[in-house]
Amino acid sequence: MDTRQAALFNWNATKTGYYMLKFLDPETNGTYNRNTHAWVEFRYAEILLNYAEACIELAVLGQTADLQNGLDALNLVRNRAGLPDRVTAVPLTAQTYLRQEEQLSSSAKDTAGMIHAAG
């Protein structure tokens, strides 16, 4: 268990004694630099795009109140990259914008993965 009374790296322990146990294999024995855990990572942009997709798909099905929420989430991703807002009142147009953004995001993820693997 990860505690502040641990023999190794007690400065980096959690106050509760539990640290992401949901994603850890109890059979793995390693330190921070010799660890074989596969960490689950979500980029903030991916979370925003998932929310945008849910809202925009609901708008396509006729719940137009969700369209602006979806566009707001989509624009948060675009603004973080220095891009201008996408504006529309047509759900199918918003769906097209979303698909384009997902393609760009997927390309960015692949590039980041290659850079991380090479580093």
Image (cartoon, rainbow, N blue to C red):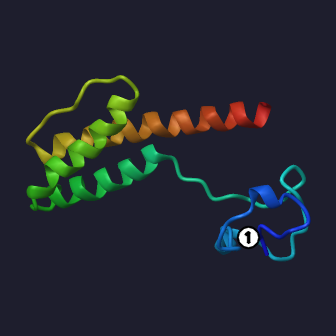
The total number of labels drawn is 1
Expressed as whole percent of the image width and height from the top left, the position of residue 42 reads: 54, 52
In terms of depth relative to the viewer, which is nearer, 66 or 17?
A: 17
Classify the position of the N terminus by image quarter: bottom right
Q: Is residue 64 above or below residue 19?
A: above
Identify the residue at image location x=72%, y=35%: 116
Three-letter code for the amino acid on which mark 1 is drawn: Leu
Q: From this viewpoint, is residue 95 visible?
A: no
Residue pictured at 38% horizontal, 31% vertical:
80
Front-lying residue, 31 or 103: 31
Viewer can see residue 53: yes
Compare residues 119 and 109 and report the one nearer the observer: 119
> Residue 56's x, y, as percent?
22, 53
Q: Quadrant of residue 29?
A: bottom right
Q: Name the residue under label 1.
A: 24
Q: For this rendering, which residue is in front, 105 or 35? A: 35
Q: Is residue 82 above or below residue 93?
A: above
Tell me if 30 is positioned left or right of 46 in this view: right
- Circle 1 SS class: loop
Residue at (61% x, 32% y) in the render = 111
Please provide percent x and percent y for residue 10.
82, 61
Image: 18 above or below 117 = below
On screen, residue 110 versus residue 43, left or right, reads right
Q: In this view, does 12 lie to the left or right of 63?
A: right
Residue placed at 51% from the left, 47% from the top?
43
For label 1, the crowd category at 10 Å Cα-Cα, with few meaning under 14, some 14 to 19 and many 20 or more, is few
Give the quadrant of the C terminus: top right
